[in-house]
Amino acid sequence: MIKKNSGRGIVWVAPASLHLLQGQAKMIMEKSTILFILSGIVLALMSVLAVDSAPAGQKGQSNGAAETGKAEVNMVNLQDVYFAGGCFWGVEEYFSRIPGVVEVTVGYANGMTDNPTYEQVCSGTTGHAETVHVRYDPQTVSLKTLAAQFFEIIDPISVNRQGNDVGSQYRSGIYFSNAADHAILASVMAEEQKRYDQPLAVELMPLRAYYLAEAYHQDYLKKNPGGYCHINFASLKDLRTEKKTLVDPGKYAKPTDAALKKILTPQAYYVTQEAGTERAFSGQFWNHREPGLYVDIVTGEPLFSSADKFDSACGWPSFSKPVEPEVVTGHVDASHGMQRVEVKSRVGASHLGHVFNDGPEDRGGLRYCINSAAIRFVPYEEMDRQGYGELKHLVR
């Protein structure tokens, strides 16, 4: 494991604290010993228990809920990600201790053979990597956080080796089953790459196949607390999981600057990336009244609801609050001889506009003055189709 100083922290500025910003700056050896002949009756009992307790198609899964403390999880919208980081015993145990992780199993992924055995995988001829399947609640822990934690327990520039374990089956990789996860994982890897001169030796690719490993591998370190493990669990003590929020930042990612120059209009690029301002009464949404959601034009992250929009007669779209305090951040702006609070989007860090304390008193007293060029409108009737259905209650 390589110890790193991440420096990933972000301080979110809630609307109530924006007033305060006005005018101020702010394994190989041990594995060989476990291949003994188990008692027939014990093996039978273990198999029955595994089959009876696991859902169809996932027999032998372990349940990490016992390791999540009192974290509340949404069992309906669980997401999946697969990590290969050397011997899967320690990797499984590590992720099972993260709040919001509900289930973790170990298996063999992205190889060339069907239903391989451990012995076959160890031969190095199957193409499979020892992998853990992580099921998690994105409202408690984001994909971005899980991926960042993965890099805390591996040497990302080591080829086909982690700890004492050597071979192609011990290569490092992140595999996804949801295409939308690629951008998020790629952004984490891009940040990690900045820490090294050598290219990362970590695969990032879709999951092609995943086969559960034998029953004795599942929850191995729980059954054998003193067992072999190359993982250092120290990084878990500083882990901060996300509180339950309406908007999961892990679902959104900022494209590269080159991509933005192709995607955005010159005006939108000028406003969001160069902190520009469109002329008053010139934007598309200054007097827009249709019900729906306003999202960051750069990332698609939800920002404002039409229900919180009001006519301020200033010539720019005005809102009394964002859909959730955390989706925007406040920054002191002393440009043009004025003391103002600049508002940026959370994930994209897009310049949106400014916030003032001259808004309607009955709505909290704030006025978020936003550039039309910085936002995209999603009509209420389109919110389900575009993936924002869970926020429809904020509009009507």
Image (cartoon, helix red, strand yellow):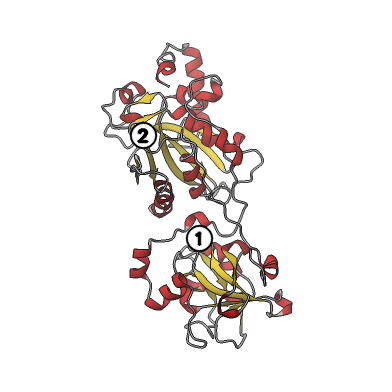
Q: Nearer the viewer, residue 179 or 341?
A: 341
- The quarter of the picture where residue 130 lies is top left
Question: Disc 1 residue type?
Answer: Val
Percent x, y of residue 369: 58, 78
Q: Nearer the viewer, residue 345 or 80?
A: 345
Instruction: Quickly name the residue at label 2.
Output: 158
Residue 396 visible in image: no
Percent x, y of residue 59: 46, 32
- Left/right of residue 161 with respect to residue 64 in the rendered view: left
Percent x, y of residue 326: 60, 61
Mark sitting on residue 52: none
Look at the numbered discs 1 and 2 and tell me whether their residues touch, using CB distance below 8 Å.
no
Question: Disc 2 residue type?
Answer: Ser
Instruction: Locate the C terminus by quadrant.
Output: bottom right
Number of numbered discs on residues: 2
Which residue is drawn at the image coordinates 64% and 75% (left, top)? 320
Which residue is drawn at the image coordinates 55% and 40% (left, top)? 102
Which residue is drawn at the image coordinates 57% and 33% (left, top)? 234
Percent x, y of residue 155: 41, 35
Q: Nearer the viewer, residue 266 or 93?
A: 266
Question: Vertical placement of 313 versus 99: above or below?
Answer: below
- The quarter of the picture where residue 370 lies is bottom right
Q: Secondary structure at mark 1?
A: loop
| First-in-chain label (1 vs 2) | 2
Instruction: Quickly name the residue at label 1.
Output: 347
